[in-house]
Amino acid sequence: MASFTLHGIPVSRGIAIGRAHLLAPAALDVKHYLVAEEQVEAEVARLQQALAQVHKELQTLWNELPKDAPTELGAFIDVHALILSDPMISEAPLDIIRARHYNAEWALLTQIDELSAQFDEIEDLYLRERKADIQQVAERVLKVLLGTEQILPKAGGGEDEAQPQMIIVAHDISPADMLQFRDRSFIGFVTDVGGQNSHTAIVARSLDIPAAVGMSGASTLIEQDDWLIIDGDAGVVIANPSALVLEQYRERQNAAARARKKLQKLKKTPAITKDGTQITLLANIELPDDCPAAMEAGANGVGLFRSEFLFMGRNSKIPSEDEQFEQYKKAVVAMKGRPVTIRTLDIGADKPLDQSEQTALNPALGLRAIRYCLAEPQIFLTQLRAILRASAFGKVRILIPMLAHAFEIDQSLAMVAQAKAELREKNIKFDDSVDVGAMIEIPAAALALPMFVKRMDFLSIGTNDLIQYTLAIDRVDYEVAHLYNPLHPAVLQLISMTIAAGHKAGIDVAVCGEMAGDVKLTRLLLGMGLREFSMHPAQLLSVKQEILNSDLARIVPQTRKIMRSMEPNVIADAVEQLQLM
């Protein structure tokens, strides 16, 4: 078989070597025919049933999302469910069947072609790429109509039994389909279409799966079971590589594996910069069962225990004080003396207690986090008592989310005092000196720091929400996600101000958002003065390696130059230079 190379867009780094598994688009199998007048309503019903079945499939996928799945996955499935419900998909094809007597598949394809043509007229590249979401939804409906649901190979197998070897090759892949591939022998994907901002590209990066998109013609040029190499760093796919090329890429793959293995040796190495500055690296967890991974990664403690995950998916049934206490105690004991920072209930916005209760027009700005807790004082007090009881078994810190007003801080501290008083009255042990901190995730908080530093014991910057509220961007909203930028000068100023204010007041400041786990930003945050990072355990060793190779004497002056700039391009270039220092 002849070897050939395809060039596309790199969207997720790494090298994958495996056999091609082709996914044929259902649209190729669609037959076009006219239905008789007396069969029209039956054809309409057939399409309605297919739409309903896809709705059910998406709901099942949403319900079965793994706890460690990237948050974007649920949002992308929601987007596809919304598209499916839109009259342009759910009603217009029915009208075409009734008016033109097309069969259901033909009617759906006709409508999708018309919509795609409208998207092609849009000048904005990002918005134009959203055409793919509509086509992916239609593809699912067509597969149901045609009865051609995808049968995927099981994990393992292939010539190398030790590793899964399937590389998906398709015209396009939806985020929902990627979920189905996740538990299979799926090590990479190649698509004809797509771009840096496509939802599947975002999901691939979240899952750390090598991928290249925009490989025009890949699904027709590549044959089933062809050997493939995906170079996710360069956006290159090599089909049927020669033995020499295969050997070269296997060596690169092994080198990357050795680098990952080398990182494991850093588990017990203190995170100290070249100039001798000690840095604290903490883990973000969602449940106590995540603690072993944090310990395995060598975390100095838990910087963010997202307690809301104990409350979600329970049909609004609030866990009891004892139930919560057991979970918090489990985490504290598992961390063996290392501090555990427990964020109080942060529900609302993208984390509703119950999906059916989500009615706010703009939940991100509604009754969420501390606003909800102060509106439901008994729920808040119950949680505070449970957290305080766990503090009798190890170092615990309480973190209050989404504070913006002085009265919210004062009321929260009063509730903590009341919870302590209630425990004392019952002679229940707890740490009376437990620290209480505030999340800085609203611009108003970052601009009113004196109000916080004189009341709180520590601060933790939630960069995800801080960026969202500063730029007015919901990053899972496909129409504006491309505007989400951690390096926006306004965002950097707010982060720098918060770190500086904490240092001046002599209180600890951490970053617990995604910026803390991005090695490309590690030196920038160090240069701002950050000494406490909290991130997913899987990111911890890579960040530690970056810290070990950093010299504050060199990066602080460069960071000051960055902070004086208001030009995004200048900032981006300077941050790249920072990584080379």
Image (cartoon, grey):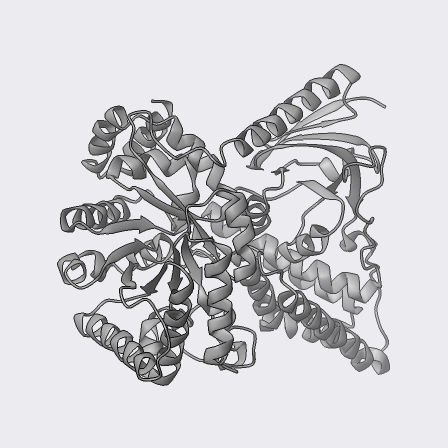
Q: Is residue 309 above or below residue 496?
A: below
* Horizontal and vertical percent position of residue 217: 71, 36
Q: Is residue 157 above or below residue 39?
A: above
**Residue 351 as seen in the image, left or right of residue 208:** left
Q: Quadrant of residue 526?
A: top left
Task: Identify the residue at image location x=80%, y=55%.
Answer: 150
* Horizontal and vertical percent position of residue 376: 35, 83
Residue 419: tell me if it is visible: yes
Q: Quadrant of the N terminus?
A: top right
**Residue 531 as seen in the image, left or right of residue 283:** left
Of 531 and 170, nearer the camera is 531
Q: Is residue 418 above or below residue 163?
A: below
Of 152 and 553, nearer the camera is 553
Total numbered badges shown on the rendered structure: 0
Q: Quadrant of residue 237?
A: top right
Residue ranking furthest to the front = 427
Q: Is residue 512 above or below residue 90?
A: above
Task: Identify the residue at image location x=72%, y=61%.
Answer: 140
* Horizontal and vertical percent position of residue 190: 68, 39
**Residue 94 as seen in the image, left or right of residue 417:** right
Task: Identify the residue at image location x=54%, y=56%.
Answer: 290
* Horizontal and vertical percent position of residue 429: 36, 73
Residue ranking furthest to the top = 244
Of 145 and 16, nearer the camera is 16
Of 461 and 319, nearer the camera is 319
**Residue 455 as seen in the image, left or right of residue 310:** left
Q: Quadrant of the C terminus?
A: top left
Task: Identify the residue at image location x=56%, y=81%.
Answer: 315
Residue 233: tell me if it is visible: no
